[in-house]
């Protein structure tokens, strides 16, 4: 019998759901074709090994705390009308699902109190989940030069944060109309800072990632983690180019497309570790262009160093409306990650020493 000859089953058929399902199968078959060259070649699918309910995730140690899931909310916002609600929703989700969170740049809190409430989410996220403040390398350089690093301690105490994330973004600052030009190499500034502070430090990029020389230097520092902020997702140099004059856009657009992807960065770190280097920092937050839990699963499994994965723009998308939307998004992330852990193995497994 040809497909076209099979009679349609009426929608309100008394046979019930099973029959409707069979009808759907017939109607959707043509739309459901896959092509061999569309396969996600990162994984082997292993349907023979696991069953349901899915094995739960083990707690992930991070910066002296335990996260229930290996997922981090990347630094984003604070200081305008919508930011307070976004941050509160993100902190609620971190509390509910056991994730960690980086606050958006807290620079304005160094000058004024107006927007303090936007950032003040410790009571929401709970003491058990990691929460980090965030500042740019330009502010850090200025404070180190002026001997004002005690301001950092005060900021962390006020926010009851576990430490500070420094975003290093020379390209963004260079293309930004009101950007700050840093005078010293960021790694020297951070080395100087590390001698002056007693709190945990994370260093990240904002959409361009880090090349091998930068990664190598960062891994030698006593950091709580390196967050990639890799190329392939939201890109802050591009954001700033779009905010500048048409002439500047024409002249500097090509530079925006320079960067290191999260996959390249994991490969670079793996090569450095597996070639026998001993590093002080041994925690990664893989972020920048993590479009789904499959990307997160692939890269965290591939990494030889302990790694969690992070997203910014995806969380932003679901944190602006009802909290229920964010709950649905995070639940899907976690269930998808668990499904991947139970049924997928990497085609190119992590290479143990
Ligand atoms: C709206 C928005 C604001 C951001 N603000 C900051 C910031 O203040 N400090 C920072 O370190 N990164 C900031 N980022 C960069 C993110 O933390 C992250 O590195 C980058 O967006 C890449 O992640 P994604 O591809 O998942 O969006 C921001 C990102 C977004 C989308």
Image (spheres, grey):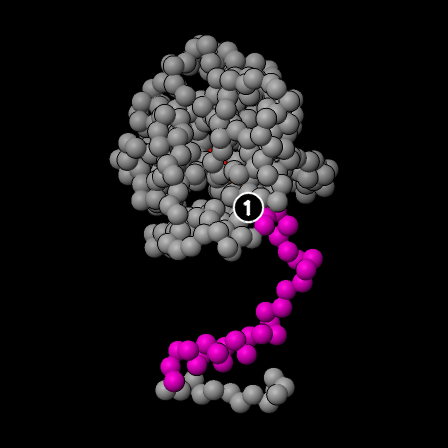
In the rendering, at what x and y percent does residue 68 appear?
36, 39
State yes or no: residue 35 in magenta: yes
Q: Where on the picture, by quarter, is residue 180?
A: top right
74 vs 18, nearest the viewer: 18
In the rendering, at what x and y percent does residue 187 appear?
57, 17
Residue visible at 52% across and 29% down in the picture = 305
Residue matched to label 1: 345
Q: Is residue 217 above or below residue 326?
A: above
Give the secondary structure at mark 1.
strand
In the rendering, at what x and y percent does residue 7 appear?
53, 89
Q: Is residue 189 left or right of residue 224?
A: right
Q: Is residue 105 above or below residue 339?
A: above
Residue visible at 60% across and 29% down in the picture = 270
Query: Mark 1 packing: few (<14 Cα in 10 Å), some, or many (20+)?
Result: some
Q: Main secondary structure of the magenta part?
A: helix
Q: Where on the picture, by quarter, is residue 16?
A: bottom left
What residue range appears in magenta? 15-44
Residue visible at 61% across and 19% down in the picture = 276
In the rendering, at what x and y percent does residue 193 appear?
47, 14
Q: Is residue 236 left or right of residue 224?
A: right
Q: Where on the picture, by quarter, is residue 93?
A: top left
Residue visible at 36% across and 25% down in the picture = 64
């Amino acid at each position: 019998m040809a497909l076209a000859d099979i009679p349609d089953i009426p929608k309100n058929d008394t046979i019930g759901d099973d029959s409707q399902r069979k009808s759907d199968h017939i109607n959707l078959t043509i739309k459901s074709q896959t092509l061999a060259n569309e396969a996600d070649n990162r994984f082997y699918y292993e349907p023979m090994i696991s069953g349901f309910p899915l094995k739960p995730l083990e707690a992930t140690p991070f910066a002296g705390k335990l996260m229930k899931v290996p997922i981090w909310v990347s630094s984003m916002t604070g200081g305008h009308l919508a930011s307070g609600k976004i941050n509160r929703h993100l902190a609620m989700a971190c509390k509910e699902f056991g994730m960690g969170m980086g606050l958006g740049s807290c620079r304005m809190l160094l000058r004024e109190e107006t927007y303090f409430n936007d950032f003040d989410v410790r009571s929401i996220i709970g003491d058990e989940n990691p929460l980090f403040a965030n500042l740019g390398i330009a502010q850090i350089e200025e404070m180190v030069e002026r001997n004002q690093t005690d301001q950092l301690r005060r900021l962390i105490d006020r926010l009851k944060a576990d430490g500070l994330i420094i975003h290093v973004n020379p390209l963004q600052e260079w293309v930004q109309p009101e950007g700050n030009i840093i005078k010293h190499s960021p790694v020297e500034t951070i080395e100087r800072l590390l001698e002056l502070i007693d709190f945990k430090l994370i260093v990240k990029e904002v959409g361009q990632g880090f090349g091998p020389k930068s990664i190598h230097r960062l891994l030698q520092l006593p950091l709580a983690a390196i967050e990639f902020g890799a190329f392939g997702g939201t890109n802050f140099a591009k954001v700033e180019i779009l905010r500048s004059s048409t002439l500047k856009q024409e002249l500097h657009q090509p530079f925006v497309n320079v960067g290191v992807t999260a996959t390249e960065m994991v490969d670079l770190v793996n090569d450095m570790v597996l070639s026998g280097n001993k590093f002080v920092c041994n925690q990664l937050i893989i972020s920048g262009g993590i479009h789904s839990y499959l990307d997160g699963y692939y890269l965290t499994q591939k990494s030889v160093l302990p790694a969690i994965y992070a997203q910014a723009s995806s969380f932003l998308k679901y944190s602006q409306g009802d909290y229920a939307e964010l709950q649905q998004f995070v639940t899907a992330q976690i269930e998808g990650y668990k499904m991947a852990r139970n049924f997928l193995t990497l085609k190119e497994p992590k290479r143990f020493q």
